[in-house]
Amino acid sequence: MLEADTTHHSTHLSGLTLEQCQSARLARDNRFDGRFFVAVKTTGIFCRPICPANLPKEANVEYFAKQVQALQSGYRPCLRCRPDSAPGSWAWKGVETTFQRAVNLIDQGELQSSNLPELSSRLGISDRYLRQLFQQYLGMSPKQYAQYQQLMFAKQLLHTSNMSIGDIAIASGFNSVRRFNDAFQKKLKLTPSDTRKTTRADTNAADATVDKHLRLSYRPPFNWDHLLAFYRKRAIQSIEEVGEDYYARTFVSTHSQGWFKAELGAKNTLEITFDIDDITQLKHMVSQIRRLFDLDADIAVIEQHLQQTAIGPLMTSGLRIPGVWSAWEAGVRAIFGQQVSITAAITVLNGFVSSLDETEESGVASRRYFPTPTEIVNADFSVLRMPQTRKDTLKRFADYMVDHMDAPPEDWLALKGIGPWTVSYAKLRGLSQPDCFLSTDLVIKKAIADVDDQKQLIESLSPWGSYATFNCWNSQS
DNA sequence: GAATTCCCCTG
DNA sequence: CAGGTGATATTG
């Protein structure tokens, strides 16, 4: 009789049997996270299957496929597992990703411009707890981890750049060459200059140039021409420049600004020429450039996976995810691109960007930076040739970003005029997430129109949906 | 390491 | 709904 009762509730489910739900929740199986929700009758609260709270008795639970169904039935979301937050948002993912985010930020050299308390508050936890997490996951303190990271970065620079050892010391986050030498010696059992000597065959130093220079490596296949063509079509004047065989752009981040140029080098490397106002931010710049050109992707594995799916025939080898400097920039580009062709969007965006600093001196600014949210908030929208509703969206977006520069793009959905396409586009190009298949994009729809089972196709692309996106786009142009 | 917060169960 | 419990995440 109890049996019959619970079975009745399985009608709320889709695609899962009651038994699956039961064992999934008992095991807190994270593979089922997000696929259904557990509501507890005695408390009126509903949870994700992975909720760490005490397991409720089977007799007291009710299963739902969607949050809204549980809400509709009078349950409130649990405060621990946050079933109300959007899947993929930071609140949804919990501590492990908080930790992962901390590691990423440190890898990007964030600790060089802020301290631990600042870093932790940015992640929404106390510095005490962050220390605890590092101890738990890595067995060392954040500071120690950061120092290893700094040394590895320094070692890489010694091998691949023409910078002086003094500059490298500072760039890696040390405050003096002495402390740098000391730490290097201690941890890597070598002196910095020895490290450099062993790999100094090239002639970069002989070029009578003062340009700073470094090399970044990647694993082939690497389709540079596709990247260039993609950027060329979307280049914003005097921020980006795409030549026959190089890409260059300016950038602004919170702590630095500068410029770089990338061109193909020998032996699977990219040659970077750059200038940055604050050399301690070099690590940040480098990780950004690696992300922009997707240098860390293991393309062979990805392609092997996608070859077996229905889009296999559309694939071109070596395609990477062409990134833009920030989620903010990607969001702006996406808003300009809503409902219009790429060319039209870029023309309007170009006009808008160049109107921003016309108040400045000599009329023609030869080099600009991508506008900040504040600049756009204060901009004159009257010169903008696009529908009023889209201007309003842009304004709202900029307003929001002034205070929420690193909120996850999912959160933008709360803003009127910003929908799933815009959010996915930002995750794809601004954050370079690997699994964003833009199934609602018109060009994509066209590319996969022949496939019978679309739903199955989309599932089969995971976790490399982003690469599928670019291969589809590429196949249609 | 204690204290707090949160959830679930029972009466 | 109040009172008792176990368990986890997080903080001072």
Image (cartoon, coloured by chain):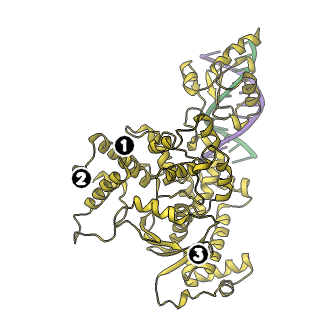
Chain colours: A yellow, B green, C purple
Crowd class of label 3 (few under 14; some 14 to 19; many from 20; radius 10 Å): many
Measured Cα–Cα span from mark 3 to mark 2: 43 Å
Q: Nearer the viewer, residue A266 or A126?
A: A266
Earlier in the chain: of badge 3 and badge 2, it is 3
Earlier in the chain: of badge 1 and badge 2, it is 1
Contact flag, marks 3 and 2 (Cβ < 8 Å) = no
Q: Are marks 1 and 3 on the same chain?
A: yes
Q: Amino acid at mark 1?
A: Gln
Q: Which mark is residue A339?
A: 1
- Would you say A403 lies left or right of A101 here? left
Mark 3, residue position: A174
Label 3 residue SS: loop
Q: Percent from the top left, x then y, of residue A156?
A: 63, 75
Q: Percent from the top left, x then y, of residue A171?
A: 55, 75
Can residue A193 be seen here? The reply is yes
Residue A338 placement: quadrant: top left
Q: Which mark is residue A380?
A: 2
Can residue A298 be seen here? The reply is no
Q: Amino acid at mark 3?
A: Phe
Crowd class of label 1 (few under 14; some 14 to 19; many from 20; radius 10 Å): few
Residue B2 placement: quadrant: top right
Label 1 residue SS: loop
Between disc 1 and disc 3, the foreground one is 1
